[in-house]
Image: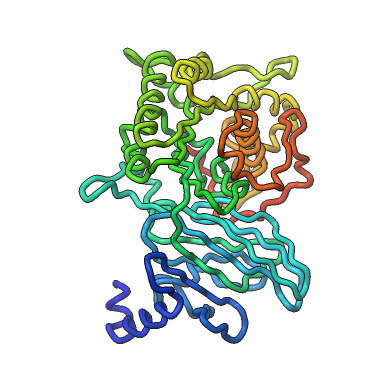
């Protein structure tokens, strides 16, 4: 049943009139929503009966409404693009602690504490997209990507936290620079707990003046990323002044056949992305693939990536492209943890930890939220050390980070999204 047939023409007209109350005139629309008690002038009131896709083009989504202290989701139909979201947090009767994610679990705001009776205003940029490339073409997504929140025509916000407190949300279309990410399962926005790519942590560390558009996907190599038209989609959205971060290697090394290898197909794919990015007036950044979690008898990391990191280093020098040596930093990071402590950064969990988990999870390639957070900090460190213009967008509370002294996991908490999967992502 369509929304139109469900509501009827009269209801749709009334809904459209109500929605227009929250929009300013002009090119950039400004959507204003109020989640508190009573009403707020100029804002559309959201109640438990405002359900996205059922009786409204905006509202609570994914079978969630504010109940107790459970996380909830709010969605709104919007065309692809970059949007600035500004939220007012706090509660007159209690202190609040709010974490906000967007789309497929991208971390936007982390543990924002607001004392009882006070409020805090916070902003972040969300990139939303669909699979279309022009009028006739599209990205060749995988069957398991169908329904992924990153590939729809709506903006979805997850409100989470120890004691979340959301009062208002203002959404406006903005024109800001974008950082596009091309990579594999170590970079991607992972939909489900306990999996996490470093790319979905990046928005948390950037000021609300630049967008992160993470096009990475599990199982992809440089050439398959291109052939699936993921890179073509990036180019269709890319503009002068944007950036493209490229990290491949794990899946490329498993390809066999003629002209497959680190100094042939791998470098060719990377160079193609570099050249096309520069033609758009954007800036490419190469990121060497991080190590897998594998140690020798002396607790030193074993290189399982062959010559692929060196091939990328060589290409960066040949093409005069900024290089972030995540491969080297991950070695320092893993050895600082050691064989046992490093398990806490990867998907290593005993059976019964998550719903439906009947067997032990032992994955030495893919990170949990803590691991993805630490790898993201390594990438940011690389930007700073390379004197990238992007360093000006890094938030002040990033501080300084040393892979040899990673953050204490006992002081780390990102409230989990209530979606879980024991299925390992593509790639290894």
Residue at position x 74%, y 35% in the image = 406
Residue at position x 74%, y 47% in the image = 412
- Residue extending farthest left: 136
Residue 356 or residue 196, whichever sits in front: 196
Place residue 72 in its image quadrant: bottom right
Residue 377 percent across, percent down from the top left = 65, 38
Residue 76 percent across, percent down from the top left = 44, 67
Place residue 168 in its image quadrant: bottom right
Residue 283 or residue 200, whichever sits in front: 283
Residue 149 visible in the snapshot: no
Residue 33 percent across, percent down from the top left = 52, 74
Residue 105 or residue 176, whichever sits in front: 176
For residue 348, above or below residue 30: above
Place residue 230 in its image quadrant: top left
Residue 283 percent across, percent down from the top left = 45, 34
Q: How is the image coloured?
A: rainbow
For residue 91, above or below residue 318: below
Direction from residue 387 to residue 297 in the image, left or right = right
Residue at position x 43%, y 80% in the image = 21
Direction from residue 153 to residue 38 in the image, left or right = right
Residue 280 or residue 309, whichever sits in front: 280
Residue 275 visible in the snapshot: yes
């Amino acid at each position: 049943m369509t929304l139109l047939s469900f509501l009827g023409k009269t209801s749709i007209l009334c809904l459209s009139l109500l929605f227009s109350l929250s929009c300013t005139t002009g090119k950039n629309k400004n959507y204003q929503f109020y989640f508190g008690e009573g009403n707020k002038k100029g804002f559309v009131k959201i109640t438990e009966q405002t359900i996205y896709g059922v009786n409204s083009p905006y509202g609570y989504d994914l079978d969630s409404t504010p109940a107790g202290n459970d996380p909830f989701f709010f969605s709104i139909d919007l065309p692809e693009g970059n949007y600035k979201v500004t939220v007012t947090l706090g509660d007159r009767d209690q202190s609040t602690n709010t974490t906000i994610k967007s789309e497929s679990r991208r971390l936007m705001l982390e543990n924002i504490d607001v004392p009882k009776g006070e409020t805090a205003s916070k902003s972040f940029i969300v990139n939303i997209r669909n699979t279309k490339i022009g009028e006739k073409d599209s990205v060749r997504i995988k069957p398991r990507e169908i329904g992924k929140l990153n590939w729809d025509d709506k903006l979805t916000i997850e409100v989470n936290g120890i004691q979340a407190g959301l009062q208002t949300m203002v959404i406006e279309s903005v024109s800001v620079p974008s950082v596009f990410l091309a990579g594999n399962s170590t970079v991607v926005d992972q939909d489900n707990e306990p999996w996490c790519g470093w790319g979905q942590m990046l928005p948390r560390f950037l000021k609300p003046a630049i967008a992160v558009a993470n096009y990475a996907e599990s199982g992809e190599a440089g050439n398959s990323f291109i052939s699936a038209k993921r890179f073509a989609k990036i180019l269709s959205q890319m503009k002068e002044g944007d950036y493209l971060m490229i990290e491949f290697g794990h899946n490329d090394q498993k390809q066999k056949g003629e002209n497959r290898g680190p100094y042939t197909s791998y470098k060719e794919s990377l160079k193609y992305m570099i050249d096309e990015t520069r033609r758009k007036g954007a800036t490419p950044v190469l990121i060497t693939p991080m190590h897998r979690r594998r140690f020798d008898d002396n607790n030193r990391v074993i290189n399982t990536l062959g010559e692929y990191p060196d091939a990328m280093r060589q290409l960066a020098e040949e093409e005069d492209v900024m290089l972030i040596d995540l491969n080297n930093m991950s070695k320092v990071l893993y050895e600082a943890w050691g064989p046992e402590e490093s398990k806490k950064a990867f998907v290593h969990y005993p059976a019964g930890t998550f719903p439906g988990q009947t067997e032990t999870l032992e994955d030495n390639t893919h990170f949990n939220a803590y691991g993805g957070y630490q790898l993201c900090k390594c990438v940011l460190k690389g930007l700073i050390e390379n004197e990238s213009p992007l360093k000006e967008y890094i938030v002040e509370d990033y501080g300084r980070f040393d892979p040899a002294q990673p953050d204490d996991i006992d002081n780390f908490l990102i409230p989990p999204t209530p979606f879980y999967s024991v299925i390992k992502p593509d790639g290894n």
